[in-house]
Image (cartoon, grey):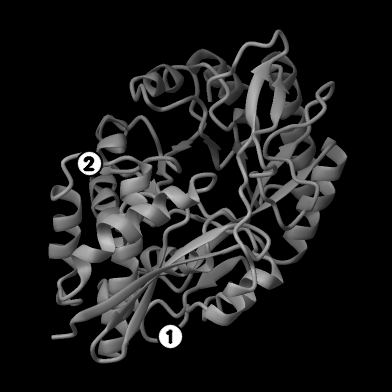
Amino acid sequence: MPKIIDAKVIVTCPGRNFVTLKIITDEGVHGVGDATLNGRELAVGSYLADHVVPCLIGRDAHRIEDIWQYLYKGAYWRRGPVTMTAIAAVDMALWDIKGKIAGLPVYQLLGGASREGAMVYGHANGTTIEDTINAALEYQAQGYKAIRLQCGVPGMASTYGVSKDKYFYEPADADLPTENVWNTSKYLRVVPELFKAAREALGWDVHLLHDIHHRLTPIEAGRLGRDLEPYRPFWLEDATPAENQEAFRLIRQHTTAPLAVGEIFNSIWDAKDLIQNQLIDYIRATVVHAGGITHLRRIAALADLYQVRTGCHGATDLSPVCMAAALHFDLSVPNFGIQEYMRHTPETDAVFPHAYTFSDGMMHPGEAPGLGVDIDEKLAAGYEYKRAFLPVNRLEDGTMFSW
């Protein structure tokens, strides 16, 4: 029995903040888990260090399911992003340990591969439609089979989701929240123009995706979906805030465009009605924010009953530890759909050496035992935490915008 003798929380900022949990056993085997919650990193760090780690010491590291249930059911105040991110970090680290002891990559422990690799999509964005199309052409030339399209909205100084750097995007951009201005009618006019231009330039053999970032009402989302139907979008992501899961029923009534949602979901309960009523086509919950591999597999299993596929969030605010865990999950589940992939900076890759690879539009977690990723603690120590917030939005009249 590998007994947990130590666990430590490591906070580092190689270009952006990451929180990592490292669990160590009495057999000298360690595992790592991602605990990053963008804009609230230290809240998870404290939850782990002050409330979770003391409960782990002395436990059998092989009892992943029991430890998951203990951390979830043993906390009277359940769920929520901080709690579920902390549980996810423990869960990832324990799967990493189990794989290392077994001498197998984690996907083999999950039943083996269901496919040769995971199709990923890259982010093409620009301040103008032309800029975005040029970026998309570069991704297509690199072998990507799926590309997300985002462009600036004419008449607006900035647009969330549009990066100044075409490869490395960090939305948490300031020590205190910046405030962006939003105009829905201008946005609804430019997106169909973007997709029309993309099909003309890229053809029909590449999947095109778009992220709405929760900024539309259900009827506005239905209208946009209908306008985009001639261009066959792979999905429309986060069309409207999903706290009211029934809102997606109204969108469904007005468009056949596939719908994806869930990157901010924490548990199966956030997605239950959307899945069982077939109001979405892709569930985007992540390993790190939805309770780890153990819980995400439950969400995927429920989704599989209703022909809903996975499409895990994979932005750069998730560390390479989470990306590795996601790829093991992607390779194993039968109802995988697609995986978001945003490249990390060279500094981040150096702090988190990993075995996963990209080739011809696909990613593979590699054959290293465990998750196939680690943290270089000496390098990590050289990057001090820097407080950073995600921006907030207001309408042009100053109204605080809900998204």
Residue at x 23%, y 88% (from the top left corner): 26
Task: Answer left or right for 163 relative to 131.
Answer: left
Query: Disc 1 designates what residue?
Result: 367
Give the residue at x 27% y 48%. Answer: 299
Q: Which mark is residue 78?
A: 2
Taking depth in this image into account, of 395 and 41 the one nearest to the observer is 41
The kind of residue on which mark 2 rests is Arg
Q: Is residue 13 left or right of residue 266?
A: right
The amino acid at mark 1 is Glu
Residue at (26, 59) in percent of width and height: 52
Give the residue furthest to the front.
50
Image x and y of residue 188, in percent:
69, 20
Judged from the image, the secondary structure of the residue bearing numbered disc 2 is loop
Note whether 121 is above or below 183 in the view shown.
Answer: below
Quadrant for the N terminus, please: bottom left
State whether residue 160 is above or below residue 34. above
Q: Position of residue 170 (x, y in %)?
A: 67, 50
In depth, the one of 288 and 260 nearer the eye is 288
Q: Quadrant of residue 108?
A: bottom left
Question: Does residue 36 appear to the left or right of 293 in the view shown?
Answer: right
**Rendered image: mark on residue 149:** none
Residue depicted at x 67% and y 40%: 161
- Do tag 2 and tag 1 residues touch (Cβ < 8 Å)? no
Q: Residue 25, how many percent across, how many down?
A: 26, 83
400 shown above or below 41: above
